[in-house]
Image (cartoon, rainbow, N blue to C red):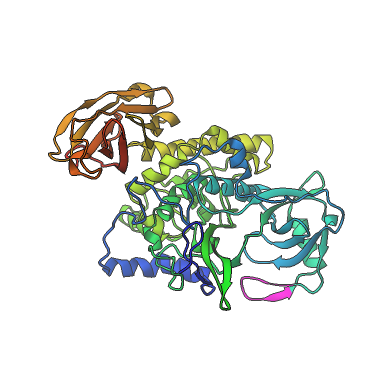
Amino acid sequence: MQRDSDEHPFAPAPEEYISPFAWDATNQTIFRPIARFFAVDPARGAVNVNAHDEVPDSSWFTNRLGRVEMSPEEVERGACEGPRLDPMMPEGSWIIDKGKDNGANPGFRINVPGVGKFMLKSDPAEEPERATGATSVASRVYYAVGYFAPCDTVVYFKPTILKLKAGLTVTNNQGVTRPFDENALELILRNASHRDGLVRMVASQWLPGKPIGPYKYDGLRSDDPNDVVAHEDRRELRGARLISAWLNHFDSREQNTMDIFLSANASKGAELGFVRHYIIDLGDCFGSVWPEDGFSRRFGHAYMFDVSYVAEDFATLGTSVRPWERAERTGHTFNYFSARDFDPEQWRGEYPNPAFMRMTEADGAWMARIVAQFDDRRIAAAVRVGAYDAKDSLYLRETLSQRRDAILRRYLTRLSPIGNLAVEGDQLCGTDLARLSGVIARESLSYRAHYYVADSFTQRGDLPVTVDRSGRLCVRLVHDSQDPDLPQADRSRYRIVDIFNGNARGPLRAHLYDLGPRRGFKLVGIERPDETYPAK
């Protein structure tokens, strides 16, 4: 089987998958929990984790912020590549060639010669500016973390820049088809947000390749030979729960994802390529409201139908006070989106997500180590893309910072938060991300390290640790005298180093080979156990 440069085997395009919202919600809320109750399927760790306790790059996830230094400008740019839309182009330059009448945000597609295709979507009439800014900001967050997300950007324009292609029709969620004509366009523009006489919409750059429908958060796509890890056992899909919690992306369901078939070549008449997996339609982040206020208050705290809370209310006669009962509107564009009462461990979406429900402590800690590097400068850069006014921008920056810190306090304090580990000469260096982020006070942290030899797993001695104010630490390694002619993989060269930060219950456990003073040490594995001894 042919492969591309990223090691994706080339294969024919899978069939398109259509996901009915009502069925998925019913299945995940009722039928799947019943089926799993009788299934022999014990919880287990994510299976696509490498020896360094990380997720390898793939068509699902590409390590960005967790592996490389992203500038605020790179965060602000996100996935946007190529020419940008220019609202100052002549009248009739943006040609509408496709309508959109489904979802909460109606809109249309434009095709601009020399620039490309963009889907333009409006805000709900009752929520001016929130959704268009939310999808722009959230897409930057997801992209910086490592997911494939679209280039969504707020644009302001005069209606005269649009030119409607004749004969268009549009089909809504109920299957009703009607003309997409001047009257339909005028209704969308009238209900959209406006500022200074200009229409405000979000322009979503058209994804490359062939859309083949959403991906599921469980199971496998049987007609994709690259899809070999059950989706609920992928760490990046499990860990996405914390990003959804951070942004209150309660609508994180399969219908808001998209699989794209990227063609590589044609062989004997068969088009070959691979599938890339995107998170899309992020407009429900940051305080989306529904006509029923009771639902709007609950978003992020409970499922629409939450069996556990129903049972608890039955047992307590409804005397418990829930967080959504204390919810108050913020006085900003973001309705009920706040840091008050935010509990990342208890956060829930619109209905159960099978990958989110299988998130383990290790999965959450992995994502928290990435989120810890999303500092206030990067948050500010992402928020700028939302084009909110000064008051709303400040509120959103502060709320995202507070919710981020709540996630880090919970998921960087049980398993070791030491990350970015590498051998530098005769030192093993990394960063205490709990210290770097400031969620743990420096004075409450203390560092020590010791090492084991493989032939006995008995502690051989302590190792000196140095740490600076930013949380960067280095452990001085020692070479044991041994036969220099021993093979590199000989068991006697095997070392284990435990590093403690004085806060997490267990150490950062590094597995190395001592190749001698000339060749140095080789890091071959990392663990984060929740206990201290024995090292094994």
- The magenta segment is 169-178
Residue 102 pos. (x, y %): 64, 66
In the shown orientation, is residue 536 left or right of residue 392? left
Where is the N terminus found, in terms of image quarters?
bottom left
Residue 128 falls inside the magenta stretch? no
Query: Is 215 or 12 nearer to us in this picture?
Result: 12
User: What residue do we see at 83% from left, 57% from top?
Assistant: 93
Where is the C terminus found, in terms of image quarters?
top left
Residue 331 appears in the figure: no
Query: Is 197 or 321 nearer to us in this picture?
Result: 197
Residue 446 pos. (x, y %): 30, 24
Query: Is 240 or 150 nearer to us in this picture?
Result: 150
| Among the 4 quarters of the image, the one containing residue 219 | bottom left
When the figure is inspected, residue 205 is found, relative to residue 225, above or below; the finding is above
Q: Total marks drawn?
A: 0
Residue 208 appears in the figure: yes
When the figure is inspected, residue 442 is found, relative to residue 142, above or below; the finding is above
In the shown orientation, is residue 318 left or right of residue 404? left
Residue 358 pos. (x, y %): 35, 56
User: What residue do we see at 27% from left, 39% from top?
Assistant: 512
User: What residue do we see at 48% from left, 44% from top?
Assistant: 246
In the shown orientation, is residue 5 left or right of residue 427? right
Residue 174 falls inside the magenta stretch? yes
Residue 352 pos. (x, y %): 42, 60
Instruction: Give the farthest residue toward the front.
Output: 485
| Among the 4 quarters of the image, the one containing residue 516 | top left
